[in-house]
Amino acid sequence: MRISVQKERKKYWIIIMISGSISASIHFCKFLTFFKTVRSQLALGNFVTKRHTKRAAGSNIRRFEWNNTLEKSADSFARTNPSKHSNINDIGENLFWHWSTKPGDFNNYGSLAAGSWIHEFHEKYWDSNILTNDLFGSGVGHATQMVWADTYQIGCSVATFKDIHKKTGRPITKICVVCHYWPKGNYLNEPIYLEGQPCSKCESKKCDKKTGLCI
Ligand SMILES: *[C@@H]1O[C@H](CO)[C@@H](O)[C@H](O)[C@H]1NC(C)=O
């Protein structure tokens, strides 16, 4: 049986919800570029981990495409002010929460979320290309979904909520970022990606040589 797993990460603040939400699609060009860059670095063998060593190049990593259906499902879910995963069938999901008194531009939170997810590979040792229980348990579950070779469709959204900070009584904005991925990754005991010459194991047999990503 294939078991796919997801990780939650939260900054704990004591807050009380007071009112409704606004949500928006993340300006996806910049965001998608970030994902493509990370996946390309990995494919080409230029991705550096905590040990300051480069990961082996990847031979089957697919290029991400923005998917409006996933964007919509991410948006609907973000609007529910989630505190747990949606567990929608067949969809991978990363969540990110942040609280701010000066939220500024929503679009920035897409990059903040993606940056924090991939940072897991810089905080923890990433010493196996197979998603073992131990590796997943070390806290790299967002990052592994981001680079999962077979996943190639993504859609994300950000929602904000008005909260009151319990200690100070001041208004604070809660920001929630949701990304949905398809096909989902993070299958336990399966490879995150296949090591080898970039472009050499693309299912489609088509590849962008410059980025090393299968298309
Ligand atoms: C977009 O994602 C959905 C899953 O939500 C998938 O069924 C669909 O095939 C994807 N669209 C494209 C163009 O791949």
Image (cartoon, helix red, strand yellow):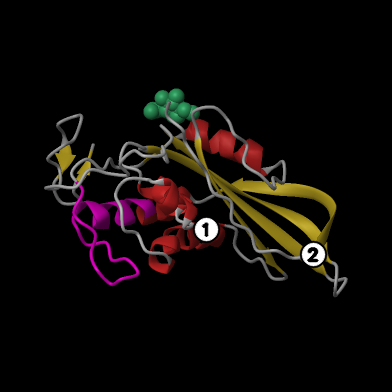
Kindly report the distance in space between the C-alpha atoms of the residues bearing marks 2 and 1: 21 Å
Decide if residue 47 is on the left or right side of residue 138. Answer: left
Residue drawn at point x = 34 percent, y = 42 percent: 64
- Give the structural element (helix, strand or loop) at label 1: helix
Q: Residue furthest front?
A: 134
Image quadrant occupied by the C terminus: top left
Q: Count residues near mark 2 (Cα–Cα under 10 Å), then give few for <14, some for 14-19, many for 20+.
A: few
On screen, residue 163 above or below 155: below
In the rendered structure, does residue 111 fall within the stretch colored magenta? no
Q: Residue at x 77, y 66 (%)?
A: 172
Mainly helix, strand or loop, the magenta region?
Answer: loop
- Callout 2 touching callout 1 (CB < 8 Å): no
Of residues 211 and 51, the one nearer the viewer is 51
Is the CB atom of the residue marked by disc 1 within 8 angstroms of ligand 1's nearest atom? no
Secondary structure at badge 2 equals loop
Q: What residue does disc 2 label?
A: 14
Amino acid type shown at disc 2:
Ile
